[in-house]
Image: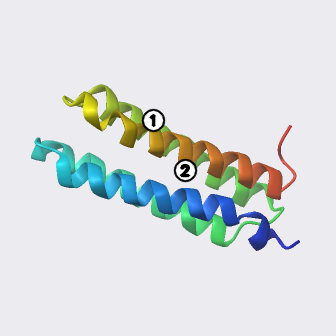
Amino acid sequence: MTTTEKLKPAYEALDGCDAALSELESLCCRPERSPRMEALAETLAKTRAGLDSASEDHDGTDSTLAHIEDAGSQIGWLQVGCCAPKRLPLYHTLLEGLTITQRTLKRATKRGH
């Protein structure tokens, strides 16, 4: 199985993250949070780009893992400041997608436990 095939669950998880973030943006009642959501979208795009070039190159994998961790901290900031408990499932979807992406990348590049 090729690395690209092994990474399919990560791509699917990132698709789910993109959809959840889009829904969060459309539901948000505080426009000042928009730049933070845009920054998260950029970090998710960097993560996807890192998957596109994933190999057993440790520097590239480390960089992509750092983007995943950065996205997680951005999601945490947004979630803690969210005023609508009904949106918590969207944050859960985002965090779960990042976890799937991270574990899939580590497994595909033989970096997992």
Instruction: Please state which amino acid type lies under the numbered disc 2.
Output: His
Identify the residue at image location x=11%, y=47%.
31
How far is mark 2 from mark 1, CA to CA? 10 Å
Quadrant position of the C terminus in the picture: top right
Quadrant position of the N terminus in the picture: bottom right
Identify the residue at image location x=78%, y=64%.
6
Residue 71 vs residue 87: left or right? right
Residue 105 vs residue 37: left or right? right
Residue 41, position as x, y percentages in the image: 37, 58
Residue 90, position as x, y percentages in the image: 37, 43
Identify the residue at image location x=29%, y=37%.
87
Using the image, tell me which numbered label, if any, was put on residue 105: none
Residue identified by numbered label 1: 73
Residue identified by numbered label 2: 67
Residue 36 vs residue 108: left or right? left
User: First in sequence: mark 2 or mark 1?
Assistant: 2
Q: Is residue 107 above or below residue 83?
A: below
Q: How many marks?
A: 2
At numbered mark 1, what does the secondary structure look like: helix, strand or loop? helix
Residue 24, position as x, y percentages in the image: 27, 49
Instruction: Please state which amino acid type lies under the numbered disc 1.
Output: Ser
Residue 34 vs residue 5: left or right? left
Mark 1 closeness class: few <14, some 14–19, many ≥20 residues within 10 Å: some
Residue 58, position as x, y percentages in the image: 79, 55
Identify the residue at image location x=57%, y=68%.
49
Q: Is residue 5 above or below residue 81?
A: below
Here the colouring is rainbow
At numbered mark 2, what does the secondary structure look like: helix, strand or loop? helix
